[in-house]
Amino acid sequence: MPRDRILRLRVAATVDETHDARSIVFEPPEDREDSLTYRPGQFLTLRVPSERTGSVARCYSLSSAPHEQGQWKVTVKRVDDGYASNWICDTVTEGMELDVLAPAGVFTPRSLDDDLLLFAGGSGITPVMSIVKSVLRHGSGRIALVYANRDERSVIFAGELGELAAAHPERLTVVHWLESVQGLPTVAALRALTEPWADREAFICGPVAFKDVTAEALRELGVPRKRVHIERFVSLSRNPFEEPVAGEDTEPSPADVAQQAPPVALEVDLDGEQRELAWPREKKLLDFLLESGMDAPYSCREGACSACACRVTAGEVKMLNNEVLEPVDLDEGIVLACQSLPVTDSVSVSYE
């Protein structure tokens, strides 16, 4: 990864949110403010030092909101045998510097004026918190939040959520679900609980079992799949902070592409720059854009993080791998540039 794609941020503060969760507040660098814009619900990729491998990369959602000037905050919860989360909670202190990649991700509402139904389980509250604060500050939408935790002391942002609900009683409804009191959430219970808000756009983040039971409850309520957004994080097999080994990026096999066919007419809109390029059919979109000198965003380059997501506005591409985009994203034309090959003779893409 070119060094100019990596941001080195100073830790301005750390906050113990609960007994097993800590927030890291970064100080934005004055000379790279253009890299610090993000949308509510997006995540950061952090470089965590490792004696065995040099470093590991982990994705953590931003719990801060874009309007909170000078504050770029991720909240990390300890995971059993989780090297990175434990290192962050035990080691990171004010004044340290960490390498991060620019914010990325598609778990973000189209409009802050839409009414939303949000589900969070445990540390899944982090991107949801960013969405809540953004809607209440800069939108007109109403929010219903169902927040599940093991017990009362595990509730991250309990005080802040209480203050927001008190300040916006007609726009924010927070329903806490405590396993110590109510047991594990069930499909039937969640279906009955959220039926009054079933006409809203839904966002789900949390442990896999929580996401599965919540998605099933929404299906039984008849919520269209295109209105359900599920945040998925997949372990990265490649470290985006380390330079790739020569030849590591293998090209698609000849069976996948017509290497002798003429190139595709490609139109690209990126950071206000519009270019027309001849896209070789055997080249993945991201690889070709980088070779052409365009500063296209990326991280894992394996279809597991959505940092390279862009929108196809004309034409068609096919993805070789996709572990994070939901059907609703695909329906909106969003694809992963690192996995995309052209299908039609002309393609237009836009980065938002």
Image (cartoon, rainbow, N blue to C red):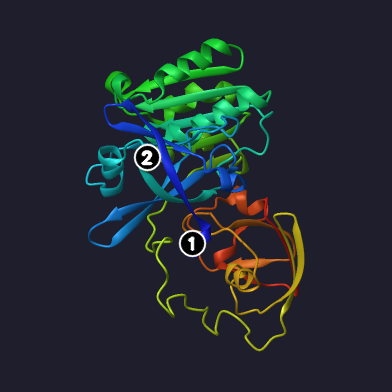
Q: Amino acid at mark 2?
A: Pro
Q: Secondary structure at mark 1?
A: helix
* 3D distance between C-alphas at marks 1 and 2: 33 Å
The residue at 48%/31% (across/down) is 119
Q: Residue 352, position in %: x, y?
A: 68, 50
Q: Secondary structure at mark 2?
A: loop
Viewer-nearest residue: 224 or 257: 257
Neighbour class for label 2 at 10 Å: few (<14), some, many (≥20)? some
The residue labelled by disc 1 is 3
Q: Amino acid at mark 1?
A: Arg
Q: Residue 11, position in %: x, y?
A: 40, 39
Q: Earlier in the sequence, mark 1 or mark 2?
A: 1
> Which residue is the extreme one toward the bottom?
260
The residue labelled by disc 2 is 207
Q: Quadrant of residue 159?
A: top left
Instruction: Please indicate whether residue 293 sits to the left or right of residue 102 in the image.
Output: right
Q: Taking the image as drawn, is residue 267 in sight? A: yes
Q: Residue 332, position in %: x, y?
A: 67, 51
The residue at 52%/78% (across/down) is 252
Viewer-nearest residue: 269 or 183: 269
Q: Can you tell which of label 1 and label 2 is closer to the viewer?
A: 1
Q: Are marks 1 and 2 in contact (CB under 8 Å)?
A: no
Q: Which mark is residue 87?
A: none
The residue at 32%/32% (across/down) is 21
Q: Residue 143, position in %: x, y?
A: 58, 23
